[in-house]
Image (cartoon, helix red, strand yellow):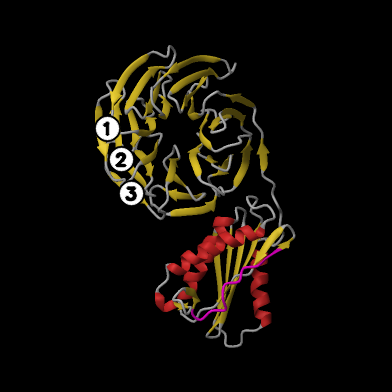
Amino acid sequence: MGRNIYFYLYKNPIFKDQFYEINNYIRKDYGKFLDSLPKKYLEYDKNGEIEDIIPSEGFDLNFSDVSNGITSYPKISSGYDGFIDYILGFWRRIATKYFFEECVLIDIHEFKNEFSLYFFYKGDIKYLSSLDDDINHTEIIECIDIIIKQYNKPFQYEFKEISVLSPTYSIKLDQTPKMVIFSPNEKYFVCILFNGEIIKWNFHTREILQRFAGHNQRADAISISSDNRYILSSAWDKTLKIWDLLSGRLRTTIQVETYIHFIKTTPNNKFIVTAMDNGKIVIWELSTGKKIRTLEGHVRMAFSVSVTSDEKYIVTSAYDGTIKIWELKTGALIRTITGHERRVISTVSGNGKLVIGAYSDGNIEIWDLETGHLIKEILGHKEMITKVQFMHNDQFFVSSSSDFTLKVWNANDGTCVQILEGHSAEISDFSIALSDNFLVSCAHDNSVIIWKLN
C-alpha cells in the first residue's frame, strides 16, 4: 500500500540550474500543506511537532536532469480512501506553481488492488484505473503507452530560453523617483519624486519640458487622465492635486482625510478612484473634485486600483492580503479574493475576465473575475513584487520587484516570456504605453528607464 507521484517537468528558468532552491520552496509549501490537514491524518514527534502524514514513507523530493528537463519523485503514502486525491491535488498545484512550461504528472497508486494513473498535461487531467485483481507490470506499461500515443510523446523535452531585454534609454536623476506614468497619447511621461517634485519629459526627444514642486511633503502617487488633459498627484500633505498636463498649472487641490497610495481615472474621465491609507476606496468627480462615494471593506491600507474598460468593475487590493471587486456604478462589493495574509498588488484585464494578484512573497496568482476561481499560481520573483499591470492587449502582463527586474508574462498560461534587466535597486513603479510597444520604469537607484518591448 503506497503511492509515488512522479513529475516530469520543464526547467523553471527562474532557478536556472539551482534545483535545491526549488526543493526548499516546495518543502515550505509542503509544511504549510501539513499544517492545513486534520490531525487524524498526521503523525507527531516527541516534541509535538508535525512529522508527516500517517502512514508515510516520508517526504523525499529529488531532482535529476533528464534531457534538459527535471524529474522529481515526491514519495507519499496514505491508507485513507479519498484522501489520496487531496494529496494529489496539492502536488498538482506545486507542478503548476513552480514550473512554467507544460507538465506531465503520473501517479501510480496500488490500494485494494486498484491501479490508478493520472496524467496532467497543458492543464488537462486524464485518469485511468483498473479494478482487476491481477494488475501486473505489463498492464501498467500498456496504460503509459496509451497516454504517450494520445499526447504525441510528451516525454520529449525542450528547454526554452527566456529573452533578457536591456534598456533602450536610461535617465539618471538627482533625487529618488516614486512613480512614473505614460500619457495615453505617448507624447509624454511624467514622474513624481519622493520629495514631491514632478518632472515631465517629451517621450520622443527625452527632453525635460517641466520640473516643478508639486507637493512640499513626501509624494505618494501620480496618474494622468485618460483624455491626456490632467496630471493627478498625492502626497503626505494629505492633498489630491489636479494639474494641467500641457502647462503644468495647478487646477484643483482637494483635501483628503489620509494618505492616497494609488490614483486611477475611469476610461470616460468622469471619475477619479483613489486607494487610501485607511483601507477605504474613494471615488471623486473629476470635473468638480466632489466626493461621490466611499467603498469600505479593506481593513488595512489600500495599495492599488484598476478599472475594466467597460467601467463595470473596480478591482482593489490592500495590505490585508485581499483583492476586492466592486461594481463601479453602485459601489456594491461583488467578490473578495483571499488566500494570503501578505500585502497584495492587483490588476484587472481591460476585458474584465482576469484578475492578477501579486504578493510580497514573490507569488503571482491568476483569477477568473466572474467566478472567483484560481486559474494558476506561479512563483514570479524571488523577492517582493512592487507592481503588476496588464498590457492593453490583455494577452500579457508585467510585474516589477525588489529583485531589480521586470518580467513580462503570458496571461493565458502564466509563462514568463521576457525579463527586463537594467536597474540596480528596487523598482518602485512602471507604466506601459498604450501601444504596448514601450515601457517606462523607475527605481531606488535614482534611474528612469525606457524599454522597447519585443
Residue 440 lies, with reference to residue 305, above or below; the image says above
| Label disc, if present, on residue 335 of the rendered structure | 3
381 w.r.t. 3: above or below? above
Mark 1–mark 3 distance (CA, rounded to whole Å): 26 Å
Q: Nearer the viewer, mark 2 or mark 3?
A: 2
Q: How many numbered marks, from 0 up?
A: 3
Amino acid type, label 1: Glu
Which residue corresponds to mark 2?
278
Task: Left or right? Give the position of 41 relative to 400.
Answer: left
* Residue 16 visible: yes
Which marked residue is nearer to the observer: mark 1 or mark 3? 1
Q: In 3D space, how far apart are the residues under numbered discs 2 and 3 (Cα atoms)?
A: 20 Å
Q: Which residue is mark 1?
A: 257
Amino acid on which disc 3 is placed: Arg
User: Which residues make up the magenta segment?
Assistant: 54-64
Q: Are marks 2 and 1 in contact (CB under 8 Å)?
A: yes
Q: Earlier in the sequence, mark 2 or mark 1?
A: 1
What residue sits 61% from the left and 32% below the top?
Answer: 453
Task: Please identify the quarter of the rendering in which residue 227 is found.
Answer: top left
Determine if the magenta segment contains residue 408: no
Q: Main secondary structure of the magenta part?
A: loop
334 versus 25 height, above or below: above
Q: Does the magenta segment cover residue 63?
A: yes
Amino acid type assigned to the residue bearing label 2 in the image: Asn
Left or right: 385, with 302 as reference point: right
Residue in view at x 65 percent, y 71 percent = 144
Q: Residue at x 62, y 56 (%)?
A: 102
Picture coordinates of residue 234, whole percent (x, y): 37, 27
Q: Position of residue 158 (x, y in %)?
A: 71, 54
Rendering coords of residue 172 (x, y %): 59, 24
Residue 109 visible to the viewer: no
Callout 2 touching callout 3 (CB < 8 Å): no
